[in-house]
Amino acid sequence: MKILEFTRRAVLAAGLAGLALASPAMAQTPPGVLIVGQIAEPKALDPAAVTAVNDFRILMNVYDGLVRYSDGTLEVEPALATDWEISEDGTEYTFNLREGVKFHDGSDFNAEAVKFNFDRMLDESHPFHDTGPFPLAFFFSAVDSVEVVDPLTVKFTLSAPYAPFLSNLAYPTGLIVSPAAVESHGADFGRNPSGTGPFRFAEWRSNEAVVIEANPDYWDGAPSLEAVVFRPITDANTRTAEMLAGGIDMMVEVPPVALSEFEGEQYNVVEQAGPHVWFLILNTKEGPFTDVRVRQAANLAINKTSLVNDVLEGTAEVAAGPTPPAFAWAYNESLEPYPYNPERAKELIDEAGAEGAELTFYVTEGGSGMLDPIAMGTAIQADLEAVGFDVNIETYEWNTFLGQVNPGLEGKADMAEMAWMTNDPDTLPYLALRTDAWPEQGGFNSGYYSNEKVDDLLEQARVATDQDKRAELYQEMQTIVQEDAPWVFVANWKQNAVTSDRVENFSLQPSFFLLLKDVVKN
């Protein structure tokens, strides 16, 4: 049976399962085919063009980078590069590439392919730069040039030492795509992906499934699965029902209220700590949140302990600032979360003359790391109204939500839910708290926060090669940002997933990616 016919039957079985919840017998999905319940439809399958972990969970199985995170850590190890050398001044990285690797379309992986990938992202004059946009090209803004030394050697020259460089190469933005496929498909490459990973793209049926099949010639050994089917099931209750009915084999981001339903022997619940922060972006450019007192009041008005204990069922901890405690070496342990103090919040609101202010609040139905966003949004709305605000919620599907929030809240909203899962303590503040990361500059500072001292600290931390010095800079940044309160700091989550007992050899990663090469499905 051809793989696409096989996986279509798998999806059909899943659909029938969803219609047969009352049946005492669970549906049986095909052996060797893993069906994953995703939180949303992917935006694209071009790793340079997307930002959501939802998409990354697919991409990490189709592509490789020069380096990758070693299993269970955020430490970097070789992948498409076998080894590398760093110059004494930290501005040159020379990579020796793995020999004999081919892209799924049959073209050769080599130094020219690496150069093509980074030039496509970073060089506006590159003939395929218009296949973007490339929203996370910030990760490689320190790269001055990429040079082909010989077919299996490539050298990156940086404008200055850049401590997160190797870590960012392991992130999905650093995954290597086939130049031949980009040249063939142009702007449609995101629907026709080709990498070097353990699985190769088979089919994308919009709003139904993305299918990837085993790459038997994978340089690091063929995967155990025949295929993986990623099904977008945006409603968390429906996703839970599908898992209980046997229509999917794996479910990521299990709603906290549903965890107790998977306590039987036929399920395995998997947890893994990682660098995650759930927060509210506040519009500091216009409206009531231009006043720091009102921003602080919002942090005091929201009962974050109740959110964590009652809405999230204890699956998270209250956040104290913009840096997740999972980055232990860079985390400022002296910071305490804003306490729940509605009376003090009212005093600050009165001082600022903001009593009765109308707030437009963007909430998403679900998305990467968003936990239980509608329930959280409703609870937050009630807390803010209790201190005198008039809060109007607007709810959007995840990709639509990102399309509203990422270009900036000016003229649209006063606050928006958001969650980030990151690979380095540089990533989130650099992309979302710097003045030069305002949306007009191509960043994700959607609330237009600006503090020259924070900008300076982040720039210094990027070029510091001593980790203790970097930690000192990040910790000072956290203190300033907490005081300025450009966000409401809500929660740090421990990620989870559930699998059926037919799934073996699966573990979650602190990177929040799904790595499925060694997974077995009986």
Image (spheres, rainbow, N blue to C red):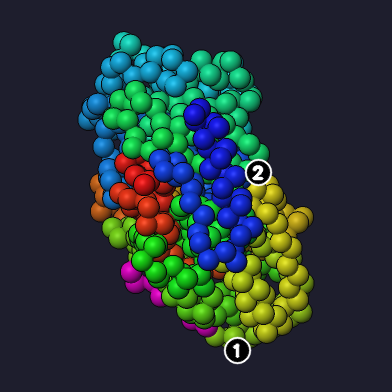
The residue lying at 51 percent from left, 55 percent from top is 27
Residue 198 visible (yes or no): yes
What secondary structure is marked by label 1?
helix
The residue lying at 38 percent from left, 32 percent from top is 198
The residue lying at 39 percent from left, 14 percent from top is 108
Magenta residues (range): 333-340
Task: Please tell me whether mark 1 or mark 2 is closer to you in this view.
Answer: 2
Q: Which mark is residue 207?
A: 2
Q: Which badge, 1 or 2, is on the more N-terminal residue?
A: 2
Left or right, residue 237 beside residue 260 = right
Amino acid on which the number 1 mark rests in the picture: Glu
Q: Which mark is residue 193?
A: none
Left or right, residue 4 beside residue 288 = left
Q: Are marks 1 and 2 in contact (CB under 8 Å)?
A: no
Q: Is 350 one of the magenta-colored residues? A: no
Depth check, front residue: 292 or 197: 197
- Which residue bears the numbered disc 1? 343
Q: Quadrant of residue 97?
A: top left
Query: How far apart in space, not on screen, are marks 1 and 2 (Cα)?
Result: 47 Å
Is disc 1 surrounded by few (<14), some (14 to 19) or many (20+) residues within 10 Å? Answer: few
Percent position of residue 224, x then y: 33, 37
Amino acid on which the number 2 mark rests in the picture: Asn
Depth check, front residue: 188 or 203: 203
Percent position of residue 322, x then y: 46, 61
